[in-house]
Image (cartoon, rainbow, N blue to C red):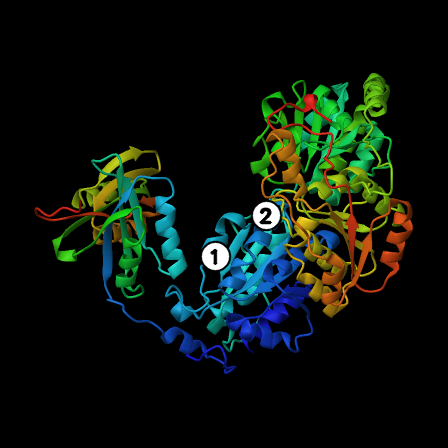
Amino acid sequence: MRAVDALMECLKAEGVEVVFGLPGGASLPIYDAFYDAGIRHILVRHEAGGGHAAEGYAQATGKVGVAMATSGPGATNLVTPICDAMMDSVPVVFITGQVRSDILGTDGFQEADTIGITMPVVKHSMMIRHPLEIPNTVREAFHIARSGRPGPVVVDIPQDLSRADIPYTPAGKINLPGYQPTTNGNQRQIRLAAKALANSRRPVLYIGGGAKNAFESVRDLAGYGRLPVTATIMGLGVFPASSPQWLGMLGMHGTRTANYAMDEADLIIAIGARFDDRVTGLVDEFAPHAKFVHIDIDPAEISKNVDAHIPIVGDAANVVPRLLAEYRDLGTDAARLDEWWRRIDSWKERYPLTYEDSGGDEIKPQFLVESLAQATGGDAIVVSDVGQHQMWVAQHFGFERPRQWINSGGLGTMGFGLPAAMGAKVGRPDATVVCVSGDGSFQMNQQELSTCAQNGIDVKAFIMNNGYLGMVRQWQELFWEHRYSQVETTPPDFVKLAEAHGCTGLRFTDKHTLVQDIRAAIATPGPVVVDVRVTPEENVFPMISPGMPAREMVG
Amino acid sequence: MGEPVTNELLSLDDLEAAGRGRTGRKHVLSILVENKPGALTRITGLFARRGFNIDTLAVGPTDDDAISRITLTLDGALQPIDQVTKQLHKLVNVLKIRDLEPEETLARELALVKIAAEGPNRAEVMQLCDIFRAHIVDVSRRTVVVEITGTHEKLEAFERLVRRFGLVEMARTGEIAIARGRTATT
């Protein structure tokens, strides 16, 4: 059997339904195998689009995404999605073509050191050195990508090796002595955490993206313990925003309630969250009264930014139910939290997440997000790009389910939105998939509209068009004395742009008809791009200013 | 070997036939590098990306704080040495490289060898240590730890001989080397 046909068998054995990619010289043999392998392949227009699409697919479905590129420039175009997947712990296998093994290292045509270039930003990478390695290598790549703390794995395949004639035997047992993730939390630590919770008067649950697969037990724990819950931008949807126990997102653009609660808490239980600088603000003054229980599958996260008093290394889905059981056994009276809840409710009342609506027809960006939530009944999968619009969606949409909200949180990759939405729609064809982007971000991967049109990928993209790189403009306004430097975008005509790619283009300018207009856009078959003209100089508030403690939020 | 435009199958034998510019002997490279973070990564990264294999690697200070010496051995039957050294020369942090001539080079390696040495075996192990001018540096009821220095070949021979007593564990430094006579790699 050709090694490339064996590769296809390996992909099928891993349950791969779809691959996002773009062929080239070094991957010609692989693409010859795609011709009749029976695996869906979506031809993207730029490898970065393929990489982000694989991320969107993985985040929407919980399965491993697969992106493919040829050697050299194909592979280097994947670097951003690889890094993005690393930062947000997204399971994606990136398969790259490589020049022939006999000319490796000679600067051959389209040769790049893919393994070397990507090394600092992968969970793992491997180059095929012998065609017989393919089955086991692919098996291991998928295993590493999806297990433990998920992440990107790169498999680099020299062109000649992929053309070899090999006897195909399916992958054997995985043998990775250096890779044994701890999923089972330590019972003693869990008991300690339960006791700490029982003794606390002002606890907060602080949820991150690592709690996605444990959302039911997180909800059970919060419900039983009457615990206030906040989440990072990656953790939105794990806990329903409609719950009275929900404090809103925390951090730089989080709610005052969430940040004040962290500031006064005596116990913070972090579940699959990593105390990012956008969450802590000035770290020395972060949650000064709190003890920390840190539940994370990655031991390197424990005490990385904030010292954990009770670290628990393990899968949240393993640890949280056991923590609840231990806590239940202690039979603590939840009435001890009455005073804490009174304090929290007073913040909620005093500092609701709000904005000043426009007097006339003008659409405020926050109003657009609320209208999107209303028009979709809060039911869509929402994918955002990066910038102000991302923060407004995070603040105002109100996510109810995990995997309903997909964004580039860690790396903050502009251009993530459209291709990731494309991947999400491919993975969840039944769901309404909405991409919310900005005029700056959208232009970074707008070529994927062509992919959507060609493959009938029904993404509805709403561009919050303010004619600025809005978040940079906001910082220049607030912290750089209003000196606007290189932030005006003079955007293209997005309606014509959409039509040129074979998509439907619409433009909304009136807030009074916005909800109906959005409904009509979503009901329009095929991919749709909507240019929504919003208030040009609106700022995202509230805000923890850089280098300031959380309690000194502004706006 | 065919170009990518062909779809002919390649046999596994064809794949193994490649190999050119090989000297067929072991090489010891003495490399002086600036003592800066990342310098070692650049060197090992270069090896990895060109598909070269390092056999042993030893890094240590020189008489100048700003400079480290890397002694690196590789098999010239498998690696195109010329390419390796030329590529190494291009690294900004690399100051000097010498491919040391075997006849004009002193090369030594240090090993710590933990050997099972109970009862009558113990005397025999000690005798062997004498012959090899090795030192016993730790003794327990069941084992001894032996420190031995010498050429790569001497250490291999020692290892072979003590294996029958029970080799519990071994740590080797990899070779360090210096040219004989007046010439210096500076």
Mark 2 vs mark 1, CA separation in Å: 15 Å
| Residue under pointer 2 | A86
Asked where in the image residue A204 lies, by quadrant, the reply is top right
| Left or right: where B54 falls relative to A358 | left
Residue at 34% in and 47% down: B166
Residue at 83% in and 16% down: A339
Name the subunit of mark 2: A
Circle count = 2
Residue B63: x and y in percent read 20, 35
Residue at 36% in and 56% down: B47
Name the subunit of mark 1: A
A79 and B145: which is toward the camera = A79
Mark 2: which amino acid?
Met
What crowding class fits label 1: few (fewer than 14 Cα within 10 Å), some (14-19), or many (20 or more)? many
Residue A145: x and y in percent read 61, 53
> Which disc, if any, is residue A385?
none
Mark 1: which amino acid?
Ile
B9 shown above or below A64? below
| Left or right: where A531 falls relative to B113 | right
Q: Locate the N terminus of chain A and report the quarter of the image it occupies.
A: bottom right
Asked where in the image residue B138 lies, by quadrant, the reply is top left
Whether residue B116 is visible: no
| Left or right: where A350 falls relative to A87 | right
Residue A212: x and y in percent read 73, 44
Comes first in the chain, label 2 or label 1: 2
Q: Locate the C terminus of chain A and report the quarter of the image it occupies.
A: top right
| Residue under pointer 1 | A115
Q: Disc 1 on helix, strand or loop?
A: helix
